[in-house]
Image (cartoon, rainbow, N blue to C red):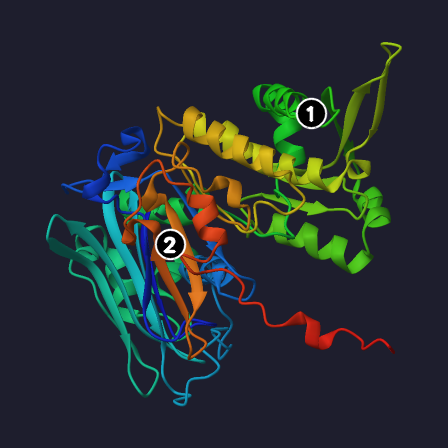
């Protein structure tokens, strides 16, 4: 689970701002099932958070900050490549580093992973286990002015000689040591703890941007009958008009693949999977909404996966259409359904940016309610940004699960919680928000001044 993230000098964040999922002790009696214990701590972490703010306030920049942390944690970099950090543009000091600090729960432990970064270097990096009020350093990494990477790793040296040797080398200056471990060693050589941390970034954390689709939807629908039935039932119950989904998975040849994709793209796709750079599996989305999947298990096999949506006509007959012909709202909802299905069975963290895009307000509300009801037996978590004010409902969420994002006079983003305000549980939170009591709403000027003047 995500516990907190602190960001400084990134996009619209100037000074350090912290978004925290730690439950307020003052609200312990409110939706107590929404909070789970933090390991080795008297505090609890929340299952959900909803972030509000005007357009341009910085909601999506928090999403992008976490995605950047994920990228730094996992991806390797070419020599002398830029770190792709996006500094706060109105900062006078162009050399000031950007800073990120993430707290999360993996392996039933609380960890801190963070770093300071400029255009070319990861200047500092740390991975720490937090045990109560104490911190157990797993490793600390620094890069000096000459670009020399030094890693202090007292705990890693106990795991194995290869990991200890890698700590002595340090790795590239523009790449995190965590990514260097993942790219250089096998899991058996870096142990269960690092494996669990890497798995949190690779599998537990799922981020869905407004213009993104769920990458493995076709594969999951064609290979997992429980998920297929769940997705069909949910679409039907949501009033989309879809009765059920029909996946078709067909094996094709390399020549068939080259007829579906530009030759250079097809060849690169095959080379990447055969080179085991993606754990022997790769997926490409075609313009018509279908997928191509390559699996490497001995010999590589290539499949084309298509999804049809079946509708029941008034006559009782079934009529199927390609999924890409469905409405944007139906396709957007289908991208979210894995969050509902997986929340019942495994620990997952979903961060969805602009959940209300193409979605009806009632459906957004029911989606969030369903998630919170269905994940009681797991440690699943959902964080969303939205403009949908119907979610400002204290029967649905706790006050500390509602957050606001706005820019101050210096054009820097600030983040704060509804728990910072004195409000009664019977108050109309939605009305107060739209009236501007909590901030984080658009400040509209006099639009009359820009209307064309009519001749009298």
Can residue 74 be seen from the camera position used here? no
Looking at the picture, tell me which residue is in the foreground, 254 or 429: 429
Location of residue 248 with respect to 2 vertically, above or below: above
189 left or right of 25 in image? right
Quarter of the rendering containing residue 451 = bottom right
Name the secondary structure under disc 2.
loop
**Contact, mark 1 vs mark 2 (Cβ under 8 Å):** no
The image quadrant where one finds the C terminus is bottom right
SS at mark 1 in the image: loop
Q: What crowding class fits label 2: few (fewer than 14 Cα within 10 Å), some (14-19), or many (20 or more)?
A: few
Q: In the rendered view of the protein, which quadrant contains the N terminus?
A: top left
- Count residues near mark 1 (Cα–Cα under 10 Å), then give few for <14, some for 14-19, many for 20+: few
Q: Is residue 193 above or below residue 35?
A: below
Residue 238 image position (x, y, % from top left)? 64, 26
Q: Which residue carries the number 2 mark?
A: 185
Find residue 269 and report its horizontal and vertical position in percent.
69, 52
Write the residue at 40% across / 56% down: 438
At which x and y percent is residue 433?
A: 45, 52
Which of label 1 and label 2 is nearer to you? 1
User: Can residue 124 be seen at all in this image of the molecule?
Assistant: yes
| Residue in the image at 57% along x and 19% along y | 226
117, above or below 308, in the image: below
Q: Quadrant of residue 244?
A: top right
Q: Residue 168, how many percent across, how many down?
A: 25, 69
Q: Earlier in the sequence, mark 1 or mark 2?
A: 2
- Residue 114 as seen in the image, left or right of residue 305: left
Q: Quadrant of residue 416?
A: bottom left
Number of numbered tags placed on the structure image: 2
Query: To which residue does mark 1 refer?
Result: 239
Q: Give the distance between the C-alpha atoms of the residues marked 1 and 2, in whole angstroms.
A: 49 Å
Determine the residue positioned at 51% across, 30% down. 340
Q: Nearer the viewer, residue 198 or 149?
A: 198
């Amino acid at each position: 689970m995500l516990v907190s993230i602190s960001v400084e000098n990134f996009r619209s964040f100037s000074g350090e701002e912290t978004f925290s999922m730690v439950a307020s002790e003052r609200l312990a009696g409110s939706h107590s099932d929404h909070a789970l214990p933090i390991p080795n701590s008297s505090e609890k972490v929340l299952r959900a958070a909803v972030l509000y703010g005007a357009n341009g306030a910085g909601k999506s920049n928090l999403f992008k900050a976490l995605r950047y942390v994920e990228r730094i944690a996992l991806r390797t970099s070419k020599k002398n490549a830029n770190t792709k950090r996006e500094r706060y543009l109105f900062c006078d000091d162009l050399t000031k580093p950007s800073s990120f600090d993430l707290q999360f729960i993996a392996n039933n432990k609380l960890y801190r992973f963070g770093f300071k970064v400029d255009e070319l270097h990861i200047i500092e990096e740390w991975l720490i286990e937090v045990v109560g009020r104490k911190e157990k350093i797993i490793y600390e990494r620094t890069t000096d002015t000459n670009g020399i990477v030094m890693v202090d790793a007292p705990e890693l040296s106990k795991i194995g000689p290869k990991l200890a040797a890698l700590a002595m080398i340090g790795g590239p200056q523009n790449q995190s040591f965590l990514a260097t471990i993942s790219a250089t060693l096998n899991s058996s050589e870096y142990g269960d703890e690092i494996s669990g941390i890497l798995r949190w970034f690779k599998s537990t954390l799922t981020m869905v941007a407004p213009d993104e689709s769920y990458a493995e939807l076709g594969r999951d629908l064609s290979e997992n009958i429980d998920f297929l039935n769940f997705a069909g039932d949910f679409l039907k119950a949501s009033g989309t008009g879809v009765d059920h989904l029909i996946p078709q998975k067909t094996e094709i040849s390399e020549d068939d693949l080259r007829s579906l994709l530009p030759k250079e793209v097809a060849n690169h796709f095959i080379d990447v999977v055969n080179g085991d750079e993606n754990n022997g599996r790769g997926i490409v989305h075609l313009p018509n909404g279908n997928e191509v999947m390559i699996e490497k298990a001995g010999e590589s096999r290539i499949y084309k996966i298509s999804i049809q949506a079946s509708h029941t006509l008034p006559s009782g007959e079934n009529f199927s259409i390609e999924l890409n012909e469905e409405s944007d709202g139906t396709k957007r909802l289908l991208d979210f359904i894995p969050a509902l299905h997986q929340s019942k069975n495994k620990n997952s963290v979903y961060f969805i940016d602009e959940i209300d895009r193409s979605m009806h307000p009632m459906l957004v509300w029911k989606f969030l309610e369903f998630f919170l009801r269905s994940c009681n037996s797991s440690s699943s978590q959902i964080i969303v940004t939205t403009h949908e004010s119907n979610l400002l409902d204290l029967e649905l969420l706790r006050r500390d699960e509602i957050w606001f994002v706005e820019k101050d006079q210096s054009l820097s983003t600030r983040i704060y919680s509804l728990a910072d305000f004195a409000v009664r549980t019977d108050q109309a939170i939605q009305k107060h928000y739209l009236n501007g009591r909590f901030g984080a709403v658009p400040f509209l000027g006099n639009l009359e001044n820009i209307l064309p003047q009519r001749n009298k």
